[in-house]
Amino acid sequence: MVGIRRLIAGSAGTLLVGMFAGFVIASAVGVFIQDSGLFGASGESPIARAYMLGLLQRDPNSIVGIRPNQSIAQRAAELQGADTSRTTTSITPLSLTYIGGASVGGYSVHIYAVDLRNAQGVDQFFPLALTVSGGKVVRSE
Amino acid sequence: MNEARAVATLSLFAFGILAGVVVHAFVDKGPAENPYPALPKVEEPRAAHDVIAAIGADDAQALSRLVDSTMLTDLDTAIQPITDVRSTKFVGAVESEGRLLSAYVVTGKTTDGIDFVVGFVLRVTNDQVVGVN
């Protein structure tokens, strides 16, 4: 009985260690492929893409989990600004292009080009560089 | 008996690795779909290449001849907090109605000696660098 328990525990342990190793290996290979652009990978971060979509759709709630923590007053002011912006101005995104990026240590930079038309019908074409670290956008300029 | 146990353990470990890769494939979703059109990439503009080459070579004299004082201030802001540039990399350029954005990634060290990476974009119009973002 004890022998069977040991066998099961040992097998489960080996399986779990293998799964952990497989997960880590797949993650590392994925990061390498993304950064190097192999197999057509763009290197774009899902976090950076989600942040850009939240900005263009003027939906601060959708990106609250991927930005640095803000005070309640800052978050409320931002929601007010987004509401005002949605109701009083008409901005039409024309294009969103991921230009490229790179990683160093725990930091990665992702650069986008945004083309949008404002309420006056004027097209604006500008870049935005996002720095991502620890699963959050820590810098946007 | 021992050989059979070793083979079984290794097989179990290999199966675990495979299972881990499969779990990762389910957990790690790529970027959300882009609902907006994306612009095609273009080649690096010559004027922007000259500016980034001066930065990469740490050639302040050449840089001073290539861009005006306002752009130098913007450039200084753009590469903060890096004070010691180690490498520059052109990551891509896009164009919309004659307005060109040429993007770069700069790696280097901060004043505290920490490795850092920043991205910035040179605006190019009529083969001239007209702005830094």
Image (tube, coloured by chain):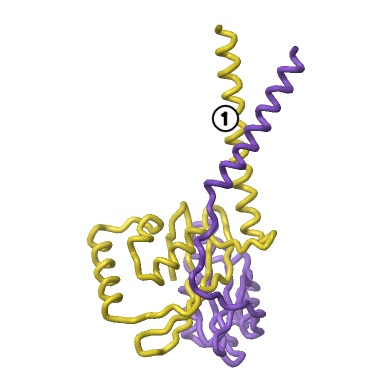
**Residue B73 in sight here:** no
**Residue B66 in sight here:** yes
For the point 37% across and 55% down, the residue is A65
* Residue B11 image-quadrant placement: top right
Q: Secondary structure at mark 1?
A: helix
Name which residue type carries label 1: Leu
Q: Quadrant of the N terminus of chain A?
A: top right
* Residue A39 image-quadrant placement: bottom right
Q: Chain of mark 1?
A: A
Q: Position of residue B65 (x, y in %)?
A: 59, 87
Specify the chain shown as yellow: A
In screen coordinates, is A79 left or right of A56? left
Q: Nearer the viewer, residue B62 or A123?
A: A123
For the point 39% across and 89% down, the residue is A121
Q: Chain B's colour?
A: purple
Query: Which residue is the site of mark 1?
Result: A16
Residue at the bottom extreme, as displayed: B126
Q: Position of residue A33 (x, y in %)?
A: 65, 55
Q: Nearer the viewer, residue A85 or B35?
A: B35
Q: Position of residue B78 (x, y in %)?
A: 48, 73
Q: In the image, is residue A46 above or below residue B63?
A: above
In screen coordinates, is B62 left or right of A83? right
Q: Quadrant of the C terminus of chain A?
A: bottom left
Q: Position of residue A87 (x, y in %)?
A: 27, 77
